[in-house]
């Protein structure tokens, strides 16, 4: 598949993704309607129920128009990143999201980096020293990591590192890049516990599978340096399966972000989602959900593209006899 | 699809001779698999002597430990295995080298070629890169110089098309991949070459070419070589001296000529005799009963004793040493001087015996008629024509062979005949019932077809459901084939006996049976349906040589007992000679030749058939010479 | 691969020649079974086992450290933490049990069907699976709770819907691995009906993965549901539940840390035990020959 072929591949996927996003947006929009209770009451929230407010609400949300028209109008607005106003705070949803986006992004990226560095590193080390003390310890650690959800890890880390030993601050976000880094370390580690475990497990299995391959033996038989064998033979082939679980990793990170932000009282998108859900603030819910959906969908596309670039069997196509 | 190159060029294309070839001596090599709770012996004691420029062969079946021996010499044993003993090369014991020190020896002094070209090459690198990375770092080369060197090496292995260097392994055929592998293995100009079954995974016609290529390069470069193979005839054609390995120990060592003239160990004799000849049809094939044991199970006695017809008490008392019977000939048989004459007599009798051909009933009714069958597979955008207008016919009680290599369509044809695929076009009639699409027939017709034709598959290790006992597998087959039988257990017992297995095997699970035993069960399973004709798709290719003959004899016996007909699908002309009366030769989805087996094999009219015949290994060096 | 490769690669020894070995069940596995059994008992008997009423508030002794009367201390409303932990096993166990059972049945049926039939049915099922199998379950639960209202059993139903695609994917993969094997083709040629092949031939070889996977699903659902409780969007406040307790007692980290650590430990212990059991079951079933 040449450059043109690659382009077609991406375009085809984009079309599928666009359809997916439309579907998701439709479901998201419908959230308002599946809520039990009077629609007006929900939208009013804590505000008084007067004819004036009802009329204002009806106009704002086009409640007297047919369902599909409402959806279309909403979708148009959504396309321009206007999601209406929050029921609880009366602030525009977009600005609410915008205020918190930075923190969640920081947290997410920090955790992702931790996940990849430790996940791949430990997985490779574990595979290369199969059966050793390190390996068995890591396997146990992986089990523990997979079974420890982010909120339990958060509380445990808080207890040990913030309260018992005072190494890290317990709450707050901090000001400035490095202070923020300091404050977000515990939450990021708590988030990364499960994802590191996933990546270690997969990397280790992939590495062990690759170690036994004939082409690795043949490479060593030709006297190639250990470094070349490690990088070009082992890592490159072993990392390909890891790309396939990138969807799970992302999901895990998103779930973790929500839990960790609540556990550490961080004002991010995750805690916004939860407070909106508790208060039934539908417009905010819609905005955040759509944002998450776009992130997931785009990330999956990226993963597919990377996978295609890395494995020539898919890129060049065709099979021999 | 890049076409195979023509037969390899004369040694002029080979690079110049390597200098300074030294001896490689292996002494008392012992390989064990270490597990937390126990140790298994893989190789109990092997001594090899390889002089400069010599070619030696290590011959053995699966479980003999031959592959691990090669790996041990290279220091490439799996992490769970340990080797002890001495591998002396250039005054050092290679077994004591660190990984760092190994890097100078591997590739540069001793090279290794592996057996499976489909897994040997890194799938994410182009062929050019694979050879390029194998070249020595000094002298430093510019990119162009390196490419030139890569192309030179490709030419040495018979690949003249420079675009191959830019292709990925999966874009090449097996034969091409193996050539690339050879070029990569030789990139550092090693003095000694270990070739571990280098042609086993290739098509028969390609095998001869690649073997000739390797031999040619070896001669031109003056390397010493160790060839590992399971085929004695190949060893005789290629090697000066042969080491016969059985269940982890050496049983005989001799020069090729001497070994071929007179084997001095019952196992070697058995191996020689169980390889059917493509030249003549013999009577019943000589078999070695039983199957290859694990080395630990026969420790402390002659490894071959449990299966040897001349075994006596002396053989099981202790492990017999390799003794020099004659100058240059070693044998581990303690009784060799006593039984030598008998062994010779047996061989003579078998070789002189020649059957006139199986009793083929005259003008049998036609059971299977295939007219112009075509099968096209669509895989996404690619279409593959597996069958391109094939017509065959098989009469009742006949044994017909279908011979071809991979891609010939023979397996597709077999699968269509038993209803696993449907023909894209063409007429197929089995016992008068139109059978090109089984799904479109009535249930009654389908039942009738099933009791007419059945199939035995190639791989005994996965043709039985691992979760079920033998008895339950057979009972199910009986329930479907002969629902009227009330006492199923008794029938199971009788089926097992008819394939030569004890009835109490019904309790066991397939995992407890050897390959040969599993294949017998598979045969028993289809017999339960009481078919009139049996399609055998390479039924013995996955089995050890010593076991193959057992199954073939069983099939021949069943035929004469039950009047079965066979459609025998194989690539092996020697098998076809022994088992069939008529023959179809297929290539590229077509029948290129057909006729009575003896005639076709003695006087082939199609060049492809002649090529196939030439590819059957013959135990003389001339066999390879004609490939060049 | 030509025929000869199969010969060379078939370097197997029949099992009967190996010396017999008794399988020793590692003490770790015994412990795991013990823990799961313990949780099951707690879930089933709940308040009968608890030394005190989990809802009773002892307002005189709030935030107390562990003592003779209260083995794990009390929480902010003076309730006995130990009793609440025992009572909390109920919501931790039964929801995941139902989820695991339902997705086992549905996932296996769909996966077998998709793998065996192939074609259009398989393509449709795979589209759906591809879309759904890696979705962030907790986020979806939060959104549903936000739109419709917090409810434990609603969450269970939603989780079933979200887990079935995952199971289907795993089983379909395992089925596809078995399909090309000659033993499947052999029984086809013998005339065994399709449904029998799927259930009695293929599925037994797929069962190790199915069983191991179900244990994973149990552990995963436990953790996800607990997460939902932690966020306050599952069971009603006041219910003894490990996730909810963790969140409510987080403020007590300075005075009675056990109040929040104990439920956390229970969650991790139960999840890890199920994971270990799942792995062990897989080993056991494959060593008996399945799927080789």
Image (cartoon, helix red, strand yellow):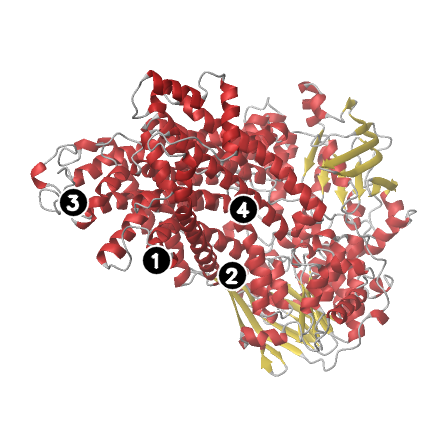
Task: Answer left or right for B345 relative to C84.
Answer: right
Residue named by callout 1: A179
Q: Does residue C159 appear in the picture of this structure?
A: no
C-alpha span from label 3 to label 4: 44 Å
Q: CA distance from mark 1 to mark 4?
A: 35 Å
Residue under label 3: C72
The residue most toward the front is A52
| Label 3 residue SS | loop
- Which SS class for mark 2? helix
Q: Nearer the viewer, residue B492 or A9?
A: A9
Task: Identify which residue is drawn at 54% across, 45% down.
Answer: C292
Please, is residue A106 above or below residue B561 in the view? Answer: below
For the residues bearing labels 1 and 2, Cβ distance under 8 angstroms: no
Both labels 3 and 4 in a single chain? no
Residue mark closest to the camera, 1 vs 2: 1
Circle number at residue B296: 2
User: Callout 2: few (<14), some (14-19), or many (20+) C-alpha neighbours within 10 Å?
Assistant: some
For the residues carrying marks 3 and 1, which lies nearer the camera in this image?
A: 1
| Mark number, residue A244 | 4
- Circle 3 or circle 2, nearest the eye: 3
């Amino acid at each position: 598949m040449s450059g043109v072929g690659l382009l077609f591949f991406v375009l085809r996927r984009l079309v599928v993704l666009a359809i997916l996003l439309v579907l998701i947006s439709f479901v998201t929009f419908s959230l308002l309607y599946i809520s039990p209770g009077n629609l007006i009451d929900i939208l009013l929230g804590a505000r008084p129920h007067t004819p004036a407010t009802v009329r204002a609400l009806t106009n704002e949300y086009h409640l007297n128009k047919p369902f599909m028209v409402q959806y279309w109008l909403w979708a148009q607005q959504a396309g321009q990143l206007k999601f209406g106003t929050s029921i609880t705070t009366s602030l525009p949803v977009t600005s609410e999201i915008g205020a918190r986006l930075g923190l969640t992004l920081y947290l997410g990226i920090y955790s992702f980096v931790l996940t990849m560095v430790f996940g791949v590193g430990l997985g490779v080390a574990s595979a290369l020293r199969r059966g050793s003390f390190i390996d068995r310890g890591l396997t146990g650690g992986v089990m523990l990591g997979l079974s420890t959800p982010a909120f339990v890890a958060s509380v445990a880390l808080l207890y040990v590192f913030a309260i018992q030993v005072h190494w890290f601050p317990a709450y707050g976000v901090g000001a400035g890049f490095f202070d923020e880094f300091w404050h977000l370390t515990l939450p990021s580690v708590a988030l990364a516990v499960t994802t590191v475990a996933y990546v270690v497990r997969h990397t280790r299995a992939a590495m062990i599978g690759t170690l036994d391959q004939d082409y690795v033996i043949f490479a060593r038989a030709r006297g190639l340096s250990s470094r070349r064998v490690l990088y070009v033979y082992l890592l490159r082939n072993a990392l390909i399966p890891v790309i396939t679980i990138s969807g799970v990793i992302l999901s895990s990170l998103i779930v973790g972000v929500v839990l960790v932000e609540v556990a550490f009282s961080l004002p991010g998108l995750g805690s916004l989602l939860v407070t909106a859900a508790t208060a039934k603030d539908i417009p905010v819910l819609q905005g955040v959900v759509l944002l998450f959906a776009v992130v997931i969908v785009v990330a999956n596309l990226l993963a597919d593209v990377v996978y295609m670039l890395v494995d020539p069997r898919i890129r060049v196509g065709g099979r021999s006899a | 699809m890049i076409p195979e190159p023509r037969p390899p060029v004369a040694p002029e294309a080979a690079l110049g001779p390597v200098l300074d070839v030294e001896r490689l001596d292996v002494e008392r090599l012992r390989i064990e698999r270490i597990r937390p709770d126990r140790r298994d012996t893989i190789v109990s004691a092997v001594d090899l002597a390889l002089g400069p420029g010599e070619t030696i062969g290590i011959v053995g079946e699966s479980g003999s430990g031959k592959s691990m021996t090669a790996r041990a010499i290279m220091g490439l044993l799996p992490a769970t295995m340990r080797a002890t003993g001495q591998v002396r090369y250039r005054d050092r014991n290679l077994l004591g080298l660190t990984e760092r020190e190994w890097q100078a020896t591997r590739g540069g002094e001793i090279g290794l070629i592996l057996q499976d070209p489909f897994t040997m090459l890194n799938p994410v690198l182009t062929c050019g890169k694979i050879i390029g990375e194998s070249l020595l770092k000094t002298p430093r080369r510019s990119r162009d110089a390196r490419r030139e060197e890569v192309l030179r090496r490709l030419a040495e292995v018979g690949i003249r098309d420079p675009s191959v260097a830019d292709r990925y392994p999966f874009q090449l055929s097996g034969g091409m991949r193996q050539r690339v592998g050879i070029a990569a293995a030789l990139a550092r100009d090693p003095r000694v070459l270990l070739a571990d079954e280098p042609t086993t995974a290739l098509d028969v016609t390609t095998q001869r070419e690649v073997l000739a290529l390797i031999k040619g390069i070896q001669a031109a470069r003056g390397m010493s070589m160790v060839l590992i193979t399971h085929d004695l005839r190949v060893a005789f054609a290629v090697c000066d001296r042969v080491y016969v390995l059985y269940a982890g120990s050496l049983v005989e060592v001799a020069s090729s000529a001497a070994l071929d003239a007179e084997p001095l160990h019952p196992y070697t004799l058995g191996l020689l005799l169980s390889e059917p000849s493509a030249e003549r049809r013999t009577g019943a094939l000589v078999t070695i009963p039983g199957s290859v044991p694990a080395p630990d199970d026969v420790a402390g006695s002659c490894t071959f004793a449990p299966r040897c017809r001349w075994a006596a008490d002396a053989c099981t008392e202790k492990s017999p040493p390799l003794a020099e019977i004659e100058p240059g000939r070693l044998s581990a048989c303690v009784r060799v001087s006593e039984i030598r004459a008998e062994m010779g007599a047996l061989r003579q009798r078998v070789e002189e015996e020649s059957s006139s051909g199986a009793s083929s009933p005259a003008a049998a009714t036609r059971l299977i008629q295939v007219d112009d069958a075509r099968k096209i597979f669509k895989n996404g955008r690619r279409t593959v024509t597996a069958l391109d207008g094939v017509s065959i016919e098989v009469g009742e009680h006949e044994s017909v062979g279908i011979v071809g290599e991979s891609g010939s369509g023979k397996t597709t044809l077999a699968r269509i005949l038993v209803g696993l695929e449907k023909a894209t076009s063409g007429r197929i009639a089995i016992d008068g019932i139109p059978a090109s699409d089984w799904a479109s027939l009535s249930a009654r017709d389908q039942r009738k077809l099933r009791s007419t034709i059945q199939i035995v598959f190639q791989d005994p290790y996965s043709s039985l459901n691992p979760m079920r006992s033998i008895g339950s597998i057979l009972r199910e087959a009986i329930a479907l084939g002969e629902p009227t039988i009330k006492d199923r257990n008794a029938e199971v017992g009788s089926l097992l006996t008819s394939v030569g297995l004890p009835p109490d095997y019904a309790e066991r699970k397939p995992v407890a049976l050897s390959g040969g035993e599993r294949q017998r069960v598979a045969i028993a399973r289809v017999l339960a349906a009481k078919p009139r004709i049996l399609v055998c798709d390479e039924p013995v290719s996955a089995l050890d040589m010593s076991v193959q003959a057992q199954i073939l004899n069983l099939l021949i016996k069943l035929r004469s007992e039950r009047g079965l007909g066979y459609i025998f699908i194989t690539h092996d002309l020697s098998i076809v000679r022994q088992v069939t009366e008529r023959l179809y030769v297929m290539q590229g989805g077509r029948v290129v030749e057909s006729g009575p087996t003896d005639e076709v094999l003695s006087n082939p009219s199609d060049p492809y058939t002649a090529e196939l015949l030439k590819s059957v290994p013959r135990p003389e060096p001339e066999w390879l010479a004609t490939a060049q | 691969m030509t025929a000869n490769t199969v010969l060379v690669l078939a370097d197997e020894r029949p099992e009967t020649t190996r010396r017999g070995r008794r399988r020793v069940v590692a003490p770790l596995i015994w412990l795991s079974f013990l823990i799961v059994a313990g949780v099951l008992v707690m879930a089933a008997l709940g308040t009968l086992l608890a030394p005190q009423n989990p809802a009773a508030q002892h307002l005189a002794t709030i935030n107390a450290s562990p003592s003779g009367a209260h083995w794990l201390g009390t929480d902010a409303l003076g309730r006995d933490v130990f009793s609440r932990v025992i009572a909390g096993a109920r919501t931790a166990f039964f929801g995941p049990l139902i989820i695991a059972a339902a997705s086992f049945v549905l996932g296996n049926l769909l996966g077998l069907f998709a793998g065996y039939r192939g074609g259009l049915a398989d393509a449709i099922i795979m589209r759906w699976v591809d879309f759904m199998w890696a979705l962030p379950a907790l986020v979806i639960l939060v959104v549903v709770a936000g739109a419709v209202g917090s409810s434990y059993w609603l969450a269970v139903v939603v989780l079933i819907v979200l887990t079935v695609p995952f199971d289907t994917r795993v089983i379909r993969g395992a089925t596809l691995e078995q399909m090309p094997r000659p033993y499947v083709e052999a029984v086809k040629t013998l005339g065994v009906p399709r449904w029998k092949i799927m259930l009695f031939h293929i599925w037994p070889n797929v069962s190790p993965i199915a069983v191991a996977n179900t244990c994973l699903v149990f552990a995963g659902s436990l953790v996800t549901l607990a997460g939902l409780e932690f966020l306050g969007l599952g069971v009603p406040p006041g219910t003894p539940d490990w996730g909810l307790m963790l969140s409510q007692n987080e403020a007590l980290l300075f005075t009675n840390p056990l109040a929040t650590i104990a439920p956390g430990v229970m969650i991790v212990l139960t999840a890890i035990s199920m994971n270990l059991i799942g792995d062990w079951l897989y080993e056991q079933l494959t060593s008996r020959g399945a799927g080789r």
